[in-house]
Image (cartoon, helix red, strand yellow):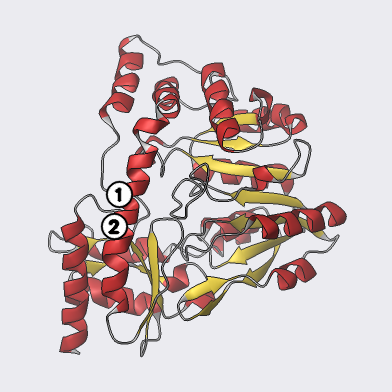
Amino acid sequence: MRQAILDLEESKIREVANAGIGRDDVLAFWFGESDEVTPDFIRQAAIDSLQKGETFYAHNLGLPELRDAVAAYTSRLHKPVTRDRIAITSGGVNALMLAIEMLVDAGDEVVAVTPVWPNLVAQPRIMGANLKRVSLRPQAGAWSLDVQELLDTITPATRVLVVNAPNNPTGWTLTRAEQQAILDHCRRTGTWILADEVYERLYFEDTANACAPSFLDVAGPDDRLVVAHSFSKSFLMTGWRLGWLAMPAAMTHPMGKLIEFNTSCASVFTQRAAVVAVERTADVTPRVVAHLKACRDRLVPQLQAIPGVQLAVPKGGMYAFFQLEGFGDSLDLAKRLVTEAGLGIAPGNAFAAEAQGWLRWCFASKDLGRLDEGVRRLQGWLARR
């Protein structure tokens, strides 16, 4: 067995969830998904496909209809993108792993902005890369990036920069000017940018296209940029395992070969559902975003009112990332909250060592009352201490 695999840390989020799964008395906010089911018309498209007998292999890069729909969807939000720059993948996780497999050799240097979803730092390690971290820094509960520190870290020896914005877990988001500065620098160093932008539509600031700033807004079609997306968040399709990549056209055919040796293709019936989801995004995503904003605005003030809590209002995503003063190990604290308070939230040190003492609360709850009850449980537990 490869030592790099043996050395991978198990998910601390899953460790906390395993302590509470099966308990009816635990309110679970640990995973990054809504508790709302996929809309009926999306599910019906998959049912119709199955009833037609579409149970066979598809093209490695995805159905042409879906690639066209994704290209059109992306072009409405950003600069025009054509089908020959789109690959459909078996989930956002698969999209990110494929990109790393495509770009990283053993011994390459990869720079990652952290705290971040742990898969994004594990994937380069799986490929044998040397990983450097540039940490966001908290101030009064808000996390921000020292852009100059990042640029100083990226050198001609840096093969790939991995950045996730809007960020899981902190809610931090890059500005357009910051993206331009990073892109210009990476052009000089010859560094690829792998941008995880799966939360771009879950953005609560007022913008012309209801979307967070994207590297696709500033990059040219041939820049060394790969952008990963998922149907999970904005379309309520977490269990469908479907995502996509936007990349330079010259990279697409090799990506198809790589997909062949990973998953061969995404299933046809899930892709049929995704076509409908993208074409009817106006019937899904604006409602999802409005509800998540209501969830955020319900939860965050209640948490901010608890003595000792450090928490800033997140601009994007579906998480409240907060610090409780007086507690050390996040994993121990999260496990205690499960067993002693019936409250399931993710430990901050699952995302980076610098997030020790922080907790991530996924507020994507269909029932706002669940958020209120969760806060009451946290307050009650703190009072009993």
Q: Position of residue 287 (x, y in %)?
A: 32, 41
User: Which quarter of the image is occupied by the N terminus?
Assistant: bottom right
Image height of 333 relative to 52, above or below: below
Q: Position of residue 281 (x, y in %)?
A: 41, 31
Q: Secondary structure at mark 1?
A: helix
Nearer to the camera, 213 or 132: 213
| Amino acid type, residue under disc 1 in the picture | His
Q: Residues within 10 Å of mark 1 (few under 14, many from 20)?
A: some
Q: Secondary structure at mark 2?
A: helix
Nearer to the camera, 79 or 130: 79
Q: Residues within 10 Å of mark 2 (few under 14, many from 20)?
A: many
Q: Is residue 85 left or right of residue 290?
A: right
Q: Which residue is mark 2?
A: 295
Image height of 6 relative to 332, above or below: above
User: Which quarter of the image is occupied by the C terminus?
Assistant: bottom left
Q: Position of residue 19 (x, y in %)?
A: 26, 66
Q: Which residue is mark 1?
A: 291
Q: Is residue 378 left or right of residue 116?
A: left
Nearer to the camera, 50 or 72: 72
- Contact check, label 2 and label 1, Cβ < 8 Å: yes
Residue farthest to the top?
Answer: 52
- Residue positioned 78% across, 37% down in the render: 222
The circle drawn on residue 208 is none
Q: Residue 82: name its quadrant.
A: top right
Numbered marks: total: 2
| Amino acid type, residue under disc 2 in the picture | Cys
